[in-house]
Image (spheres, helix red, strand yellow):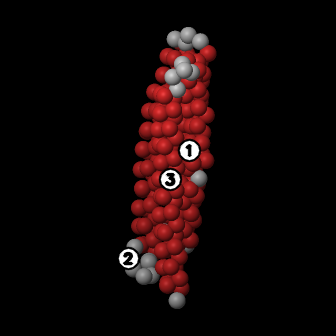
Amino acid sequence: MTTANPSHADLKKYGAEIEHAASRRNRLEYLAGGGAAVFLLLGGILIMLGADGVPDLVVAAGFGALVIGIVAAGVRLVLAGRKTAPNMSGDSSAELRRHLETERDLLRTAWLWYVAPLVSGFLLIYGGVWMSSPDRPAFVLIAGTLTLMFLMAVALLNRRAAAKMDRELRELARRDAGAAR
């Protein structure tokens, strides 16, 4: 969209580009999440089957909690994806704005529905590892810190993408105001 007064066709094309990018991102999330969930589920089952005591069971429970968190995030993404597809048949600008606002809000709150559900699983895993050798906390501290940094990076990257959507919304509003004159 390079014109000052975007046409319906321009807005429709831009909406399609946004929808394509969001769909591609979501497909990658489903693939990565599904692969991680299968890996974690199998790992949790193997740990549980070979458990020597409570620490192993706590770690296995952590793997299970991670799987539940991944599935919950995937369900949230699927449900949000069903609601966000733009319908560019009517007022294209308003529909595109609604779509961008929904995508922005989804990205802005990713820490809540995407990152937070994973925290309990990591806490259980690292707690179980720490329980098995409380006199050597180095691994738990290092792995826990790296995990926390990774989760924070995911949350920050999503906030950054939400800020980009805010800029897109401001640009669209500016163009709408120019078109109304």
Give the numbered dot on residue 156: 3
Q: Which image quarter holds the N terminus?
A: bottom left
Please state which of residues 55 and 45 is positioned toward the viewer in this rendering. Answer: 55
Which residue is found at the position 47% from the left and 28% from the top?
A: 139
Q: What is the distance, in whole Å, between disc 1 and disc 2 at their CAs?
A: 34 Å
Instruction: Tell me the SS state at disc 1.
Output: helix
Q: Secondary structure at mark 3?
A: helix
Which residue lies at the image location 59% right of the left edge and 32% below the top edge? 123
Closer to the chain start, of discs 2 and 3, is 2
Dot placed on the residue nearer the N-terminal end, 1 or 2: 2
Indicate whether 40 appears above or below 6: above
Distance Cα–Cα, label 2 vs label 3: 29 Å
Q: CA distance from mark 1 to mark 3?
A: 12 Å
Query: Is residue 135 something one can see in this rendering?
Result: yes
How many other residues sit within 10 Å of disc 2, few (<14), some (14-19) or many (≥20)?
A: few
Q: Position of residue 77 (x, y in %)?
A: 55, 46
Badges 1 and 2: C-beta atoms under 8 Å apart? Answer: no
Q: Taking 49 as reference, is 2 above or below it?
A: below
- Amino acid type indicated by mark 1: Tyr
Q: Are marks 2 and 3 in contact (CB under 8 Å)?
A: no
**What residue is at 48 percent from the left and 58 percent from the top?**
160
Between 132 and 124, the one nearer to me in the picture? 132
* The label number, if any, that marks residue 167 in the structure image: none
Vertically, is 81 above or below 74? below
- The amino acid on which the numbered mark 2 sits, given as a three-letter code, is Thr
Q: Which residue is mark 2?
A: 2
